[in-house]
Amino acid sequence: MSPQSLYARIALVFAGIVLALGATLGWLGYGAAKQHQHEILQRVNLGLAQHIAKQPSLVADPQNTQRLFDHLIAVNPNIEVYLLDPQGKVLQTSSLQTSSQPVPLPRQEVSLEPVRRLLAGAALPVTGDNPLHAEGREIFSVAPIETADGVAGYVYIVLLNDMYRAMVADAWQGYALRNGAKVAILAVIVAIIAGLAAFAAVTRRLERTIRDVEAFASVPSEDVLPTSTALKHRHRRGDEIDRLRTAFASLRKRLNMQMTELKRQDELRRELIANVSHDLRTPLTSMQGYLEALARMDDGMDDVERKRYLDVAVRQSHRVSRLAQQLFELARLECEDTQPQPELFSVSELVHDIAQKFALVAQRKSIHLHTEIDEGPLSVHGDIGMIERVIGNLVDNAIRHTPEDGDIYLVAHARSRGIEVRVDDTGQGISEEQLPGLLVRGSPIRRMATQRGGGLGLLIANRILHMHGSAIQAASRIGEGTSISFILPVAKVA
């Protein structure tokens, strides 16, 4: 494993924290044990000074006091005995403990504040001054020397002298080395092993996620990446790694969907270019042929034939112009930047306006244009210009495919799902086999319609309705006509 990996870094940091924590706990444990030892030692020896203070003539007979102190030191060399006056000044001590010390003592006076606290029953251990050391404090035992006139002084016993402290330090060091070190090292090793195992379990999932990301970055395919376990728990909240895997799985799925859609759009674009080339080739070839014939035979043509050639060329040019305009409009609608500008408008008024717009065109072809509109405004929420384009395309297609003396019905009814707009004609109709390809580019019925002078009006209308959350519904029978409809949602009135 690389030392720069996340696991290695976490392991090193964790090991350092455990070692520092172990050292801190060891130091605190040592201090607590030492404090506990001092408390026990002081509690056991609280009555020692009181026992000595009961001896008569401690203050009045210095020689007797000296012999008593020397005897105590000889019996228990681990203590230091002092006689203090009522103000804490050292009056006398054993000659055995001062033989190696310079005269006078480093500290000639003892603070009485710890003495009063110990006599008042303060919590143990209580530490006080040591006359043999200018600095530092030690545990002690003390008792007042009471006379008829009051307190004549104090018997002050330091319970830990230099020799005892040296022995205790050696004992503690040996114990720490033999036992404490072993326990601490064992605890640290166990903690490090457990921590590394836990980190390995945590980082293993992260490692899988990293491998998934790297694989996806190199080959963004659904086949490369197995289904993440996080997907099975998408709706269950987990830790940061689970959330990361879930987010990445969602991102992966979304990117794959987008790439699939891009591929589909690219295929449609290629198909559109092929269809456009095919659709434009026929009128352009026809127009070119008539214009070339007109140029070659202009001198041998009469006015009637020349006019017929020119009319055909003009019609073909109009057809090319209309196809080009529709192609541009369809491409613009398929662009994501083109969005409807919705507003509240009345479908009934819009249908009336479109019927009046196409009335003259239908009359010229001897076609009867009827309207059937429910009462009321029939209000919807949408882009009125786009919806007008949809209905206009449907009526234009119906007029072009309806023979003379035929009928076209422009209908607007309120339904439970919304406002239904329908255009019915009595034209030739479409077979059931060809009907599904009515809105599919490159289908046989679409190529046939283009060859007969049709355009892309239905495709444009269906794209607009798709942007409004609707779609074209077609029904037709051969010899009876065709019915094209769509439904717009009813606008909510405040």
Image: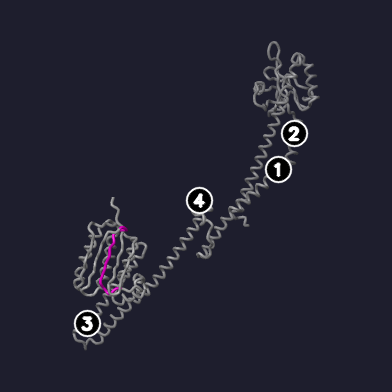
Residue at figure coordinates x 24%, y 57% from the top left? 377
- Give SS at disc 1: helix
Q: Quadrant of residue 366?
A: bottom left
Q: Disc 2 marks which residue? A: 168
**Residue 237: assigned label:** 4
Span of residues in magenta: 416-429
**Residue 308: assigned label:** 3
Pair 2/3: label in front:
3
Mark 4 and mark 3: Cα distance apart in space: 77 Å
Q: Nearer the viewer, residue 16 or 82?
A: 16
Pair 2/4: label in front:
4
Contact? badges 2 and 3 (CB < 8 Å) = no
Left or right of 149 in this view: 309: left
Sequence order check, earlier mark of 2 and 4: 2
Figure check: 237 above or below 22: below
Q: Nearer the viewer, residue 421 or 477?
A: 477
Mark 3 and mark 1: Cα distance apart in space: 113 Å
Residue projecting furthest to the bottom: 300
Q: Amino acid at mark 4?
A: Arg
Sequence order check, earlier mark of 4 and 3: 4
Q: Position of residue 288 (x, y in %)?
A: 29, 81
Contact? badges 1 and 2 (CB < 8 Å) = no
**Residue 348: assigned label:** none
Q: Disc 1 marks which residue? A: 183
